Amino acid sequence: MPNTQLLRLAKTGANTAELILYGVIDRWGDIDPKTVRDELKSLGKIDVLNVHINSEGGSIFDGLALYNTLRAHDAKKIVHVDGIALSMGSVVAMAGDEIVMAEGAMMMVHNPLWVQAGEAEELRQAADVMDKLKDQLVAIYARRTGKPAEEISAWMDAETWYTAEEAIAAGFADRTEKRMAIAAALDPARFHNLPAHLRQSPVNIPPQVKEPSMAETNTAPQGPQPAAYAELKAAFPKATADFLTSQLDAQATLDQARAAWQRNLEERATAAEARLTELKAKADEAAKAAAAKKPIGSAGLNDSGEATNVDAGDFAALVDAKVGQGMPRHLAARRVAKENPAAREAYVAAYNAVHKLSQR
């Protein structure tokens, strides 16, 4: 198994086994569906499989592969949501014959997400595929909950979060159980309807990674130690390599790195806000010119009356501004493309030009 802390499968009795799914569902990430399938086959016949989930989701296709692998297995599947089952994590949970939510656990459903760049026809085709994928996920949730597809679709549109009790009431789970609380490690920037108590929580090292106690190490207490690369990567999954390297070079502790990351986000948000103000001023000028019936073809307007003094950087700046305000990047790009088609077209044209040059 690639990471025994995040993905583990082992027999717990003559006819029982335990599967741990803690992390991102992705063939190149923490949880590889092919590995799970191969390891399940190697166990032989089992009657009960206890599946423990603490996942913020991952790849749609890998999640569906994992869901179908578990659902097709002959054993009785008892799914335990230990911390979080978000996005594709909630889909995988639906493979359980019985679904148990730990006290304090959360489940979330939302629309499938996809990042796509290309010409208009390519983007339209991508949107069609997204609709088909959503239909598949709605069918999975409907099969488990017995709720109408229209109701489930509305829940997904709103990115709906459920406590253990709410998940049971909606049909996503069967019962809850008390256990030691588990702090979920997730990136708040990925979600736009995150509950307040999770939004305010610090980004933590994944809960299964704990520092040894004094009794375990049998050593004298030490002060804060510089964070290792693995710790920084786990704490800041969206950080650039430059940021991680800078913290390693500075021998920063995790607390110091968190403070630096916060400053980094604030600086980017400030810059994005400034750029957004500039772009709004441009838009206001274009609107005034259009209202004054400025002659077609004059500087700053095209035949449709849209501003032409935009460039590819405008689109990126607008997206950064919304990301700085807390919106996930994929949703920010979608919103900016809708609200600022001229900036989006300039970005796509610049992207295609660079891409074609790189192919020569």
Image (tube, grey):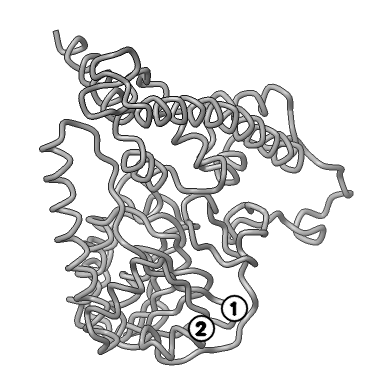
Indicate the secondary structure of the residue bearing disc 2: helix
Residue 56 in which image quadrant:
bottom left
Quadrant in which the N terminus is drawn? bottom left
In screen coordinates, is 289 left or right of 44?
right
Residue 144 in which image quadrant:
bottom left
Residue nearest the observer in this picture, 204 or 69: 204
- Please name the residue shown 24% across and 19% down the image: 296
- Asked whether residue 47 is in view, the answer is no
- Amino acid type for the residue under numbered disc 1: Gly
Residue named by callout 1:
104
Q: Position of residue 40 (x, y in %)?
A: 26, 68
- Please name the residue shown 24% across and 78% down the image: 150
Residue nearest the observer in this picture, 271 or 258: 271
Residue named by callout 2:
164
Work out which residue is located at the far right of the displayed protein and give it: 220
| Label 1 environment density (alpha carbons within 10 Å; few <14, some 14–19, many ≥20) | many
- Amino acid type for the residue under numbered disc 2: Ala
Q: Where is residue 131 in the image (x, y as percent from the top left)?
A: 18, 59
Residue nearest the observer in this picture, 14 or 261: 261
Give how far apart the Cα atoms at labels 2 and 1 are: 7 Å
Residue 195 in which image quadrant:
bottom right
